[in-house]
């Protein structure tokens, strides 16, 4: 069964304190791994798609990396506006485009 | 680009009535649209997948007669919650995948907060 596990559940950082969020996955053939950001009461906002082990993508203070078993979302020098829930999701290369989401990591960045 | 609009953002209805939620892709054609339900501080639970012009595929445990999905065009899908009950109160979110671009990611609407009283 395809599964996504994110850790930690919640992370509290001081402004400027870099850290990483983890996403472990098991999937029967990976088509893509996705990272989304979700603010309270809003729909998820797309951040990155990673397709193969070794791939990296960056956007402002965020950098996503992928191995065969997990993905990391690195946050460099975070600001309070980076506070949100970060969701990881995977899509198998079978079963259409069904996407399985992890429970998310709630990030709090204090000024 | 890749904007998905969901309407309404909030709705309160009486128990026993039906509610329709619309999901539109504004600047692209969506081959596939997805409907999710999200409980507080929980992840997204896929309810169903809809492809334009065909019947929706529902996930196990989701009642197809209660959650009616119509995907009549490449830019519009609707979810109707029929005979709503308080336990149907939740945050419903749609997403859409762009047609033919070879991209696999889906883009999400703003979500609809449904409260059944």
Image (spheres, coloured by chain):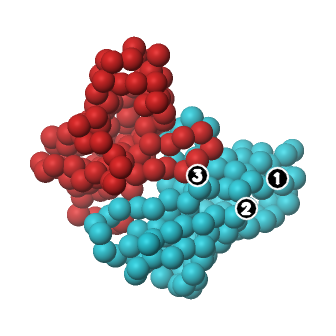
Chain colours: A cyan, B red
* Disc 1 chain ID: A
Residue under numbered circle 2 = A8
Distance of label 2 from label 3 (alpha carbons):
15 Å
Name which of mark 2 and mark 3 comes first in the sequence. Answer: 2
Determine whether, in the image, residue A45 is placed left or right of residue A86. left
Q: Residue at x 23, y 37 (%)?
A: B65
The answer to whether marks 3 and 1 mark residues whose Cβ atoms lie closer than 8 Å is no
Residue under numbered circle 3 = A37
Q: Tell me, yes or no, whether dots 2 and 3 are on the same chain.
A: yes
Which element type, helix, strand or loop, lies under badge 2?
loop
Name which of mark 3 and mark 1 comes first in the sequence. Answer: 1
Residue under numbered circle 1 = A12
* Disc 3 chain ID: A
Q: Is residue B79 visible?
A: yes
Distance of label 3 from label 1 (alpha carbons):
16 Å
Determine whether, in the image, residue B67 is placed left or right of residue A80. left
Q: Residue at x 78, y 55 (%)?
A: A11
Give above or below for A111 relative to B18: below
Q: Position of residue B60 (x, y in %)?
A: 34, 54
Give above or below for A24 relative to B63: below
Q: Position of residue B109 (x, y in %)?
A: 42, 41
């Amino acid at each position: 069964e395809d599964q996504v596990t994110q850790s930690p559940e919640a992370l509290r950082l001081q402004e400027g304190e870099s850290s990483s969020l983890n996403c472990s996955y098991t999937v029967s053939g990976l088509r893509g791994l996705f990272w989304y950001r979700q603010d309270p009461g809003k729909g998820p906002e797309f951040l990155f798609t990673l397709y193969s082990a070794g791939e990296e993508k960056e956007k402002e203070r965020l950098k996503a990396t992928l191995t065969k078993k997990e993905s990391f979302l690195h946050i460099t020098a975070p600001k309070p506006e980076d506070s949100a829930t970060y969701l990881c999701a995977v899509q198998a290369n079978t079963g259409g485009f069904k996407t399985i989401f992890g429970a998310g990591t709630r990030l709090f960045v204090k000024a | 680009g890749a904007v998905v609009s969901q309407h309404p953002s909030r709705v309160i209805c009486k128990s026993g009535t039906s509610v329709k939620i619309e999901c539109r892709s504004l600047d692209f054609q969506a081959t596939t649209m997805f409907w999710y339900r999200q409980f507080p501080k929980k992840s997204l639970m896929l309810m169903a997948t809809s492809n334009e012009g065909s019947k929706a595929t529902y996930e196990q445990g989701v009642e197809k007669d209660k959650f009616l999905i119509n995907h009549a065009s490449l830019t519009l899908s609707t979810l109707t919650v029929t005979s709503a009950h308080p336990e149907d109160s939740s945050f419903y979110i749609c997403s859409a995948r762009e047609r033919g671009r070879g991209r696999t990611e889906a883009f999400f609407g703003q979500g609809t907060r449904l409260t059944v009283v």
